[in-house]
Each structure stands twice: as structure tokens, then as C-alpha cells.
Amino acid sequence: MRQLEDLKLENLTLAVDAAGVARLTLARPAKRNALDAATIEELIEVFTLIPRSGVRAVVLAAEGAHFCAGLDLVEHHREDRAPAAFMHLCLRWHEAFNKMEYGGVPIIAALKGAVVGGGLELASAAHIRVADASTYFALPEGSRGLFTGGGATIRVANLVGKARMIDMMLTGRIYKGPEAVAVGLCQYLVEGSSEAKALSLAEAIAANTPLSNFAICSGISHMQNMSGLDAAYAEAVLAGVVNTQPAARARLEAFADGTAARVRPE
Ligand code: 1HE
């Protein structure tokens, strides 16, 4: 099997620390990290390998002032794509983002500046979103004569609800600051660096057992796609595997003998 170190990345950078926390960076700041077809292929390559690489958490960050300006509109204009070609391109976006959402490795997006269009679709495939004071969210497709193609109708609608998503697309409404947290676009808003916060979250998450993180970061998404009856069944099966894992024994023993941390608000 290919290893992460074997990948030749041009539009992304990747570094994994000793604790298994990966820093994956969108690296086309001159183009505001717009997602061209090549970047999507690199995301597919990275997230194909991540689940079996020993990586315990991923911080998804970006170079420059903006997280991601969405679909590469210049490439799209230049390519003058046929309908079927753009459909197939969208399917590659889904391949990348599904690997992220369902891969079982926690992904924490460190957001700043523009998180728009396909950039919001990318961010919404992460499991946690951290915004800073510069971060703003929008779906400008309506005004560009476009429609979402990278999963926003599923993931962004899940985050903010159908009515807000339709409003964002029809009117170009921009959310930022506390309002963005309140509507569900991000879970954290920090005064300083979103990347520093994302890293500290990733480090804490990396200390969980990988199997628990796997269940949380793939099982919940799968179960949301099922009927309630089937989801309850799948939850029981997954809990059977996770909650009896040998790696959890020492943690349970520490609770039983009173040495483990208690869950308290302070
Ligand atoms: C780009 C892109 C892009 C910048 N594709 N090249 N997305 C949008 O509608 C957002 C489009 N972008 C913007 O509104 C602005 O660029 C930003 C607000 C994000 C940043 O503004 P600014 O003033 O810092 O940068 P800029 O001068 O607009 O752009 C700098 C360069 O980045 C410039 O290239 P240059 O070679 O002329 O220097 C821009 O062309 C380039 N650039 N954004 C290509 N998006 C699967 S369907 C998904 C559908 C969508 O995502 S629709 C939403 C598209």
C-alpha cells in the first residue's frame, strides 16, 4: 500500500507530528485556495490513505488570508465543460468529501477569511469547524449562475437547515462571528488563531482511543442516513465493538478505582 510520504502533493502540504496529528494545508493562496480539479484529486489521495496511516487527527488549514474561495471559477470558465464532464468532476468532489466525512479520522477545520461556495462544502466535510474573527461564510452560487455540486445540499443543509441554506444561496447572505456559531456553521469562534485552537482540539482528540474516534467520525454520519430502526441496530453493533475494546480497559479501571478525571464543568 502506498504511504502518505509517497504522495507528491503540489496544491496541499502535509506534515504529521509524533502524536499522530496531521496538518493538511490548502496551498494555493495566490488563488485564494480555489479548488481546481488537481486539488480535488490530491484530497482524494490524502484521505484514501489517512484512515490506515496511523494519523489520529487532522487539522485542515490554509495558507494566506482565506480558507477557500470555492470552485476554481477560472478553470471552470477556461475548460468550458460539457454537462457530463462537470457531473463527473462533482463526483470526484464527493469522493474526496465522503472520504473525509466517513473516513473515521477526526478532521478539524481551521477557518479564516472566505469560506465560500465549494470552500464551505469542504469545511462542512470536516467534523469540527473553528472560525476566527476574519472568517465569513457564504454560498454565492446564485449570483454566479451556478449551483452547489460538492455536497452542500446535504452537509450545509444539515448544519444550518434548509431555509437558511436557500436564503444564503438566493441572496448571497454572509454569516460571520457569533451569528455563524449560532446558526451552526462553526462550533468554535476564537479571538486569536483558529489554527492554534484547532491544533489544541486535535491534540486532545488524538488522546482518545482510535476506535472511539472512528465510530464517532464515521458511525454517526452513516446512521444519519438510515431509518431510525436501522440506526439503532447499527449503533448497538458499533457499541458492541467499541465499548468492549481492550484499549478501553485501563480507562474503565481508572474510573472504577477513582483515579480517572470526573466530568465536571469547571
Ligand atoms: C480565484 C477564485 C476562484 C479567487 N476561482 N480563481 N467562489 C466565489 O464566488 C468566490 C470568488 N472569489 C472571491 O470572491 C474573492 O477572490 C475573495 C473574496 C475570496 C478574495 O478576494 P481578494 O480581493 O483577496 O482576491 P481576488 O483579487 O479576488 O483574487 C486573487 C486571485 O485569486 C485572482 O487571481 P489572479 O491570477 O488574477 O491574481 C483570482 O482570480 C483568484 N481567485 N477566487 C479561481 N473561486 C462544486 S460546485 C461549487 C460552486 C462554487 O464554489 S461557487 C463559489 C465560487
Image (cartoon, rainbow, N blue to C red):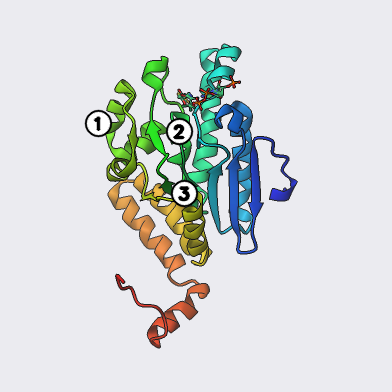
* Marks 1, 2: nearer the viewer: 2
Earlier sequence position, callout 1 versus callout 3 = 1
The number of discs equals: 3
- The residue that label 1 is drawn on is 163
The residue at the point 65 percent across, 43 percent down is: 13
Q: Which residue, as the protein is rendered here, is positioned at the far bottom?
A: 257
Q: Nearer the viewer, residue 15 or 156?
A: 15
As measured in the structure, the alpha-carbon distance from the residue carrying label 1 to the one carrying label 2 is 22 Å
As measured in the structure, the alpha-carbon distance from the residue carrying label 3 to the one carrying label 2 is 13 Å
Which mark, by number, is residue 13?
none
Q: Nearer the viewer, residue 221 or 127?
A: 127
Which SS class for mark 2? Answer: strand
Inspect the image, locate mark 2, and give the three-letter code of the amino acid beneath it.
Ala
Query: Residue 227 in the image: x percent, y percent?
Result: 31, 46
Q: Residues within 10 Å of mark 3 (few under 14, many from 20)?
A: many
Inspect the image, locate mark 1, and give the three-letter code of the amino acid beneath it.
Ala
For residue 152, say whether it is visible: yes
Query: Residue 178 in the image: x percent, y percent?
Result: 30, 44
Query: Residue 82 in the image: x percent, y percent?
Result: 55, 12
For residue 3, say whether it is visible: no
- The residue that label 2 is drawn on is 114
Relative to 103, is 142 above or below? above
- Mark 2 lies within 8 Å of ligand 1 (Cβ measured): yes
As measured in the structure, the alpha-carbon distance from the residue carrying label 1 to the one carrying label 3 is 28 Å
Q: Residues within 10 Å of mark 1 (few under 14, many from 20)?
A: few
- Image quadrant where residue 169 sits: top left
Q: Nearer the viewer, residue 77 or 84?
A: 77
The residue at the point 38 percent across, 34 percent down is: 137
- The residue that label 3 is drawn on is 194
